[in-house]
Image (cartoon, rainbow, N blue to C red):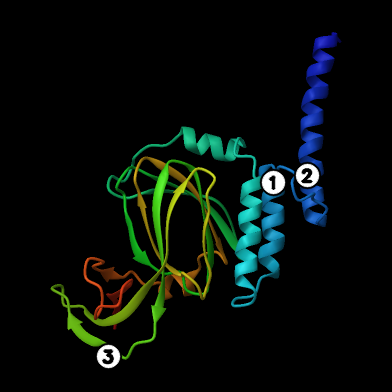
């Protein structure tokens, strides 16, 4: 065997050994806080954190730990780079969604936006989330739902289906412009309603804990609101409506 062949084999084996070692360290919680993470190690650590999290308990600390993991993730991993390179605008006027990994306790997605492919106001009941731009720039707003005494109304759609129209008050909690490497978080209690507007072509890693399931998908609300009209002169407070089938 030539020296070049031997070196090539050793390089490949060493790379595999490093990957295996990182994954093993993540599983056993031995990572140094500043050590870059490959994809498998990232998922192992994310799985460990998410399995320990309970809804409503120390959620801010939980999302901050996920955010710290994201900042250590090696974005050159083929899982991410292959999806970025394969981008096609398959749904004009709406973002592209690739589910990179899903377990019961968390999911990791890649969202890819053309400029102006706006995600309107919506919530994530009993979920925590972290947005992490890989490329581009996004305008992200987070809101809290204020107590109100609006009564639901029954309405009939043109197709004959009956819905309940609900009215809520949304208070703007945070307004951020995110660029590559920035982070935006939401918890079950704080900033759980948000909207996302890319100001240029953008690619974003999106993590939610727990993962989407039948229960939280059914409970999710999509709000209609006009931010040009504040509610009763209260700056940053807007009246919003959402609909539920009866």
Q: From the viewer's perspective, is residue 57 above or below residue 29?
A: below
Residue nearer the viewer, 242 or 134:
134
In the picture of the structure, the residue carrying the numbered disc 2 is 22
In the picture of the structure, the residue carrying the numbered disc 1 is 40
- Farthest residue in the top direction? 2
In the picture of the structure, the residue carrying the numbered disc 3 is 151
Residue at 40 percent across and 78 percent down: it is: 145
Q: What element does badge 1 sit on? A: helix
Q: For label 2, count other residues whose C-alpha is less than 10 Å away and answer few (under 14), some (14-19) or many (20+).
A: many
Q: Quadrant of residue 233?
A: bottom left
Q: CA distance from mark 1 to mark 2?
A: 8 Å
Which callout, 2 or 3, points at the residue further toward the start of the chain?
A: 2
Which callout, 1 or 2, points at the residue further toward the start of the chain?
A: 2
Q: From the viewer's perspective, is residue 219 above or below residue 32?
A: below
Which callout, 3 or 1, points at the residue further toward the start of the chain?
A: 1
Residue at 72 percent across and 61 percent down: it is: 48
Residue 16, percent across and down? 77, 34
């Amino acid at each position: 065997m030539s020296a070049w062949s031997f070196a090539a084999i050793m390089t490949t084996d060493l790379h595999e050994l490093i990957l295996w070692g990182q994954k093993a360290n993540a599983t056993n919680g031995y990572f140094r806080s500043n050590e870059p993470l490959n994809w498998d190690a990232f998922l192992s650590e994310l799985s460990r954190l998410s399995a320990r999290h309970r809804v409503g308990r120390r959620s801010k600390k939980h999302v901050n730990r996920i955010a710290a993991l994201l900042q250590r993730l090696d974005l050159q991993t083929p899982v991410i780079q292959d999806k970025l390179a394969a981008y096609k605008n398959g749904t004009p006027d709406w973002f592209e969604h690739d589910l990179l990994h899903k377990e019961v306790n968390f999911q990791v997605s890649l969202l890819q936006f053309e400029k102006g492919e706006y995600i309107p106001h919506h919530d994530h009941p009993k979920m925590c989330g972290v947005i992490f731009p890989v490329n581009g720039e996004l305008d992200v707003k987070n809101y809290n739902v204020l107590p109100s005494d609006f009564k639901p109304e029954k309405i009939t759609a043109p197709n004959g289906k009956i819905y309940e129209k609900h009215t809520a008050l949304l208070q703007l909690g945070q307004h951020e412009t995110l660029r590559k490497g920035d982070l935006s978080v939401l918890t079950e209690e704080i900033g759980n309603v948000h909207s996302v507007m890319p100001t240029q072509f953008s690619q974003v890693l999106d993590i939610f804990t727990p993962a989407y399931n039948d229960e939280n998908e059914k409970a999710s609300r999509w709000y209609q609101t006009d931010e040009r009209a504040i509610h009763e002169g209260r700056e940053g407070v807007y009246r919003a409506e959402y609909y539920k089938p009866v």
